[in-house]
Structures are given as structure tokens and as C-alpha cells.
Image (cartoon, rainbow, N blue to C red):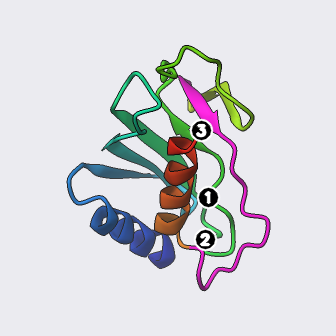
Amino acid sequence: MTPEVKQAVGELRACFPDTEVDAVSTGDGGAIVTIARVDPGPVYTQRETWVRFVIGFQYPYADIYPLFVRPDLSRADGQPHGEGIAQAEFHGHKALQLSRRSNRLNPMIDTASLKVMKVLEWLRAQ
């Protein structure tokens, strides 16, 4: 992992101190990151999910996109997921893809931790 990717993983661990944050090298300087347990919010039947994503070797000059959560995450009201949430696969595992691209990425501000927090905030508001 590049020094920037290692730093991002450390920041994620600090941001999510109550759960495991695992990072596996992609072999090219990046990392596949798993945050073991987060609360997706009361709108969902399941009150716990993992979050997975890649921090590419280009970080911080590349967006953290997309993020993935458990494939069976379902809305408590029985309604289908809205725009930006779709069934997908991530490294051979079924998942829900959360499509939230940062259109004006600022590598000085838009950290991996901030991106994950923004996407989780968006997910909880769905």
C-alpha cells in the first residue's frame, strides 16, 4: 500500500473505533477495505451492515467509488431501493452497490473517511 493509502486506512480506523476496519493490499498500492459493522439507519430492517470499497493506488487523487453493503439490506417499509442503490458483485461476492460519485473531488479535503461518512449519511436519508 502507498503511504497515502495506509494513512487513509488509519484515519478510517480512527473514524470507526467501535468496529474492525480491515485492509487487504490490492498488490498495486491500493487496498480493499472492509468496515465490519455500521448502522445503516432506522429506514432499514437490518440494523447492521458491512461496508466495502477500494482505495485505489491513485489516492488521494482518485474518488472512493463505489461503496458496497450487504446484499440483503432491505427497507423497513417494504419499498424498493431508490436511485443509486443496485444489486451488484464486489470481488466475487453479492452486494448492494451505493453509487455516489464525487464530481468535484478535492484531494486536500475529500478523504476516504469523509467519503464513507457522506455515503452513510446519504444511505440513512433514503
Mark 1 vs mark 3, CA separation in Å: 20 Å
Please identify the quarter of the rendering in which residue 87 is found. Answer: top right
Q: What residue is rendered at 50% in x and 20% in y?
A: 74
| Residue 59, numbered label | 2
Q: Residue flagged by tag 2: what amino acid is it?
A: Tyr
Whether the residues at callouts 1 and 2 have beta carbons within 8 Å, the answer is yes
* Front in this rendered view, residue 82 or 60: 82
Q: Amino acid at mark 1?
A: Ile
Mark 2 and mark 3 lie on one chain; the one further toward the N terminus is: 2
Quadrant containing the C terminus is: top right
In the image, the segment drawn in magenta is 92-110
Question: Which residue is depicted at the point 40% across and 21% down?
Answer: 45
First of labels 1, 3 by sequence position: 1
Taking the image as drawn, is residue 125 in sight? yes
Which structural element holds mark 1? Answer: loop
Which residue in the protein does label 3 denote?
126
- Per the rendering, the mark at residue 64 is 1
Q: Is residue 26 visible?
A: no
Q: Residues within 10 Å of mark 3 (few under 14, many from 20)?
A: some
